[in-house]
Structures are given as structure tokens and as C-alpha cells.
Image (cartoon, rainbow, N blue to C red):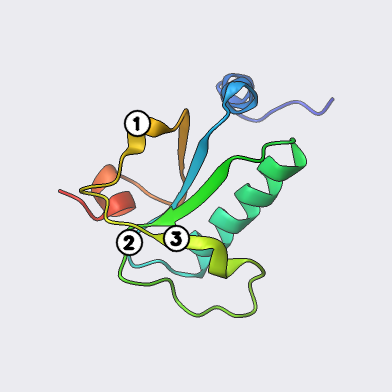
Amino acid sequence: MKKMNYPQSQQILEKIKSSEKILINCHTGADVDSVSSCLLMNKALLSLGKTNIRMICSDKSVPDFRFLIDINKIEIIDANSFLFDKYDLLLILDSGNWSYATGSK
């Protein structure tokens, strides 16, 4: 097996493996980096046998990157009223802080 790059890599992988309900988040002002990261993480989770995955974005819309497969599966949510606690794991990609990730204050 290839060595993982970060000290927490194994711990993160174990948390993913033990989670049943997983959220993947695109940051507000979603750009191609955020959207493609979300879609690729979804694909990676599916390859691990995860099936209860939801991709979300707390923006007014997701840019129309038609060249990205499954972009229409990313749901627009209101982060201020969304029930995050119904999920085992929230994966925040391409974001430096909670406000940027969700657009909430």
C-alpha cells in the first residue's frame, strides 16, 4: 500500500469508512475548483462503496459547468437552516473557514 502523505490521512480514511451518511460541500461563490473537488470526492466515496452521499452548496446557484459530469446532483441549500447534524460526516473541500464554506455567519 502506498504511504499516505499526512499524519492524519489514516484517521480521515477510517472516519470515511465508518460513516454512513456523508455530506460534501462546495464553497459559496462556487468555482470550477470547488465544484470539481466535490464531484471527484463523490466519485471516490462511491468507489469505496458509500451510497448515502449528498453534495451541497449554500449559494444561489452552482455555475453551469456542463462539461462536469453529475453537476446537476449538487443541491443548493440554506446553510442557516440546513440540518447538518443528520449526517455522520461533512467533507468541506477547497475552503479556509466555515463562513466561506457555507456562506453563513
Assess whether mark 3 and mark 2 are in contact (beta carbons under 8 angstroms).
Answer: no
The secondary structure type at the circle numbered 3 is strand
Image quarter where the N terminus lies is top right
Residue 44 in picture, x, y percent from top left:
70, 45
For badge 2, the amino acid type reads Thr
Quarter of the figure with residue 26: bottom left
Q: Gap between marks 2 and 3, in whole Å?
A: 13 Å
Q: What residue is shown at x 55% (from left), y 69% (from top)?
A: 72
Return the disc, 1 or 2, that comes first in the chain's sequence: 2
Which is nearer the eye, 45 or 7?
Answer: 45
Task: Give the total of numbered labels.
Answer: 3
Q: Residues within 10 Å of mark 2 (few under 14, many from 20)?
A: many
- Residue where numbered disc 2 is placed: 28
**Please, is residue 95 above or below residue 84 in the view?**
below
Residue 3 in picture, x, y percent from top left:
75, 25
Assess whether mark 1 and mark 3 are in contact (beta carbons under 8 angstroms).
Answer: no
The secondary structure type at the circle numbered 2 is loop
Instruction: Tell us which disc is closer to us: 1 or 2.
Output: 1
Assess whether mark 2 and mark 1 are in contact (beta carbons under 8 angstroms).
Answer: no
**Please, is residue 63 above or below residue 90 in the view?**
below
Q: Gap between marks 3 and 1, in whole Å?
A: 17 Å
- Residue where numbered disc 1 is placed: 85
Q: What residue is shown at x 52% (from left), y 48% (from top)?
A: 54
Quarter of the figure with residue 4: top right
For badge 3, the amino acid type reads Glu
Q: Residues within 10 Å of mark 1 (few under 14, many from 20)?
A: few
Quarter of the figure with residue 90: top left
Q: What residue is shown at x 32% (from left), y 58% (from top)?
A: 58
For badge 1, the amino acid type reads Asp
- Residue where numbered disc 3 is placed: 75
